[in-house]
Amino acid sequence: MLDLDNGSYWTFGVWTNRKIELQFQRIKSCSQFKDPEMRLAFLRKLTAIEGIHIPENAVGSRPSFPLSTLRNKEDLDTFIDIITWAIEVYKEQIN
């Protein structure tokens, strides 16, 4: 969860079943992510990582993928870069 002055935002969760659950359903509370095209952009960035296969019609739900997908440093770094991008989108809402 990301806490900002204007609210709290869920982007993803890591569960004990070794899955990362994306919170597309919840990120719609951010004005920029209300636009389905922005959620699709987020999803497309993620599916560029080898091993992440999420259908585009999942941008309104909470799809998941195995944590092991990020086992190599390059894929983990890419995931962190994508989450950093999402955080910047959230921050734009309060500026």
Image (cartoon, rainbow, N blue to C red):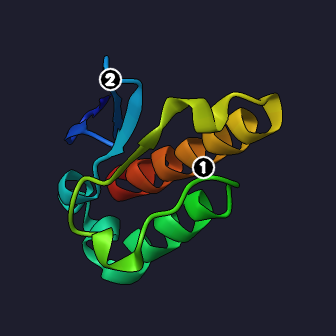
- Which circle marks residue 7 in the picture? none
20 is higher (above) or lower (below) than 92: above
Of residue 20 and residue 83, the one placed in the foreground of this image is 20
Inspect the image, locate mark 1, and give the three-letter code of the amino acid beneath it.
Ile
Residue 65 figure quarter:
top left
Determine the residue positioned at 51% across, 31% down. Answer: 67
Of residue 3 and residue 62, the one placed in the foreground of this image is 62
Q: What x and y, as percent, mark residue 66?
A: 48, 37
Determine the residue positioned at 47% across, 44% down. Answer: 87
Q: Which residue is mark 1?
A: 82
| Badge nearest the viewer, 2 or 1 | 2
Determine the residue positioned at 39% across, 51% down. Answer: 90
63 is higher (above) or lower (below) than 35: above
Question: In the picture, which quadrant includes the N terminus?
Answer: top left
Label 2, label 1: how far apart the Cα atoms are:
23 Å
Inspect the image, locate mark 2, and give the three-letter code of the amino acid beneath it.
Asn
